[in-house]
Amino acid sequence: MTDHANHLGQPIGPPVDDWTPRPRPDGRSLAGRFCRLERLDPARHGRALFDADRQDETGASWTYLPYGPFERWEDYADWLARMAPQEDPFFYAILETASDAPAGLASYLRIAPEAGSIEVGHIHYSPRLQRTPAATEAMALMMGHVFDDLGYRRYEWKCNALNAASRRAAERLGFTFEGVFRQAGVYKGRNRDTAWFSILDHEWPAMKQAFSQWLAPENFDEAGRQRSPLGALTPPHS
């Protein structure tokens, strides 16, 4: 609902004052305590990513992606060579601080500077990165860059509606579920219904505080286990 109306009495959206199209991602590195994100460079990151991904012996991490798993280095290298130069999707390699080695990928995509809308996707974490503080911090860094540095209004997460793990991750990270687009695509010869999630610019400050609290050193014990889950710090979904 809206409290705004035009001269005909029709409801209209509230004004967005002094709006200008937002900058596109520029490839700057994003650094945190547990990880660092660098613009994907096949020569620097490729082989280490392939070796890390090979730890997923079943290929389960690739099930809902439109590509993979890659059995041969040559096939993965060819895919990286095609993806890395693109501006949309705009890929980052995720490097663990402890090892300074690449362990995952993520990208910005469906970048719409004129609307201030951008999506995070093509997320693929090797087993070494999955369910670690670095995995969460990588998402927080990408979100913070979008809202704090680039000034976008809307950050999207979309996934196969059958991908329960991705849906849980979106909600844990503060995204609000918006619905399912039925028969939204075909991947690997199968139908895809797509679940949509978003977080908006006015919701970001509370999420930023939640990430800061969760990632703080005092939230982890001597064995590196979290004391408080992120879900306990995340504000309620609107």
Image: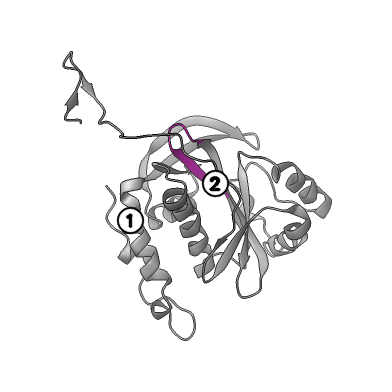
In the rendered image, the vertical position of residue 116 relative to residue 206, given as above or below: above
Type of amino acid at the residue the image marks with label 1: Pro
Tell us which disc is closer to us: 2 or 1. Answer: 1
Q: Which residue is mark 2?
A: 121
Judge from the rendering whether residue 97 lies leftward or rightward of residue 55; answer left or right.
Answer: left
In the rendered image, the vertical position of residue 11 relative to residue 95, given as above or below: above
Q: Residue furthest front?
A: 18
In the rendered image, the vertical position of residue 25 relative to residue 110, given as above or below: below
In percent of width and height, residue 3 lies at 16, 30
Q: CA distance from mark 2 to mark 1?
A: 22 Å
Q: Earlier in the sequence, mark 2 or mark 1?
A: 2
What residue is rendered at 42% in x and 34% in y?
A: 20
Q: Which residue is mark 1?
A: 205
Mark 1: few, some, or many residues within 10 Å (few <14, many ≥20)? Answer: some
Q: Which residues are magenta?
A: 112-122
What residue is rendered at 66% in x and 70% in y?
A: 100
Type of amino acid at the residue the image marks with label 2: Gly
What residue is rendered at 31% in x and 48% in y?
A: 202
Check if residue 186 falls in the magenta segment: no
Query: Which residue occupies the foreground of this view, 205 or 45?
Result: 205
In percent of width and height, residue 53 lies at 69, 60
What residue is rendered at 57% in x and 67% in y?
A: 35
